[in-house]
Amino acid sequence: FVGTVDQLKPGSFLRNLDAKTWVMRFDATQAARESAPEGAIIALYQKCPHLGCTVPWRPEFSWTDPRSGETYQGWFRCPCHGSTYTVSGFRVFGPAPRSMDTFALTIANGNITVDTGKIKQGGTGPTDNSSRAILPG
């Protein structure tokens, strides 16, 4: 259990240190950028797929998205070697070989549970990770 849907408004996140996960919920703008449904939730493994550093969410960090050419704030940025990822964990820059890994998650009665035993390797396509996001029921 990492939190409730009520705690996770669109455009916000939960960080759970026990699960080593970032649980992100896409607002309308993020959903459009990620080709995901608005309000969808994704659980990202905090470990960088390059060398395993813990990747922080940097809401103040500004970067140009190579998919659109748009510059905006709010990225995951690895402090070790600079790999940069979108809100869905898609790799846009750096030495990481792929996007951030995701965990399976379920939502039941408003409760969000992350299964840390089920890691899905991050993809290389721009919608591989965002397609794993789920809408609350």
Image (cartoon, rainbow, N blue to C red):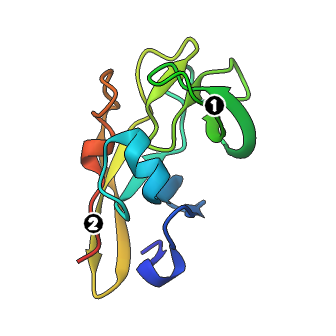
Left or right: 18 as drawn, with respect to 73: left
Residue 2 sits above or below residue 119 on the image: below
Residue 131 sits above or below residue 27 on the image: above
Find residue 137 and report its image quarter. Answer: bottom left
Rendering coords of residue 131 (x, y %): 25, 44
State the count of labels: 2
Q: Which numbered disc covers residue 135?
A: 2
Residue that numbered label 1 is attached to: 53
Rendering coords of residue 62 (x, y %): 72, 33
Residue 55 at least partly seen: no
Whether residues under marks 1 and 2 lie with C-beta atoms below 8 angstroms apart, the answer is no
- Mark 1 vs mark 2, CA separation in Å: 29 Å
For disc 1, the neighbor class at 10 Å (few under 14, some 14 to 19, many from 20) is some
Looking at the rendered image, the quarter that the N terminus falls into is bottom left
Residue sticking out furthest to the right: 60
Amino acid on which disc 1 is placed:
Cys
In the structure shown, which secondary structural element does the residue marked by tag 1 occupy? loop
Rendering coords of residue 136 (x, y %): 29, 73
Find residue 74 and report its image quarter. Answer: top right
Residue 15 sits above or below residue 125 on the image: below
